Image (tube, grey):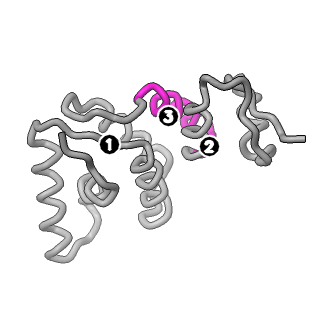
Amino acid sequence: MIGLDTNVLARYYLAGHEADAATARQQQAARRLLEGGQPLMVCKTVLLELEWVMRGAYASTREQFVGVLEHLLSLPQVTVEDRVSVEAALAGYRSGLDFADALHHASYRACETMASFDDRKFGRRASKLGLVPAVALPR
């Protein structure tokens, strides 16, 4: 099994952006790797970084990242670390949460509550969505 770094996924999914010769070679190598059929793995931290890169460096939309993540999850040769949490985070992200907040929250599904000082952007949205565990302000 081969673990994939963020830059490999970025080269694969952002291949339509202008590239110099070296980047074009990396895009081709990423395509061969992801489409080659060998077992691959992606960890949750790589997905966090990929969303950040797509949003920040490439001004990708929420819908574009959802499409990338859905495609990646559909690849039979790709194992995604803690897939259940990633799928729950994707649902939260579709519902308006930041991807990082959604993934953190989904990773705490065995907890009674999640403590966060981010009440306005995260806690209130999580409450409106009825997410479990509840997000609470530390007192």
| Residue 124 percent location from the top left of the image | 79, 36
Q: Which mark is residue 42?
A: 1
**Placement of 120 over or under 27, stated as above or below:** above
Disc 2 element: helix
Rendered-image quadrant of the N terminus: top left
- Left or right of residue 94, residue 112 in this image: right
| Most distant residue in the right direction | 139
Q: Nearer the viewer, residue 61 or 80?
A: 80
Q: Which label's residue is closer to the chain start, 1 or 2?
A: 1
For image coordinates 48% across by 57% down, the residue present is 52
Residue occupying image coordinates x 9% and y 42%: 36
Label annotation for residue 90: 3
> What range is drawn magenta here?
83-98
Dot 2 and dot 3 residues touching (CB under 8 Å)? no
Q: Cβ–Cβ below 8 Å for labels 1 and 3?
A: no
Q: Quadrant of the C terminus?
A: top right
Badge number at residue 101 = 2
On the image, the x and y values in percent for residue 32 come to 10, 50
- Local SS, label 1: strand
Reading the chain from its start, which is encountered first: label 1 or label 3? Answer: 1
42 with respect to 88 (left or right): left
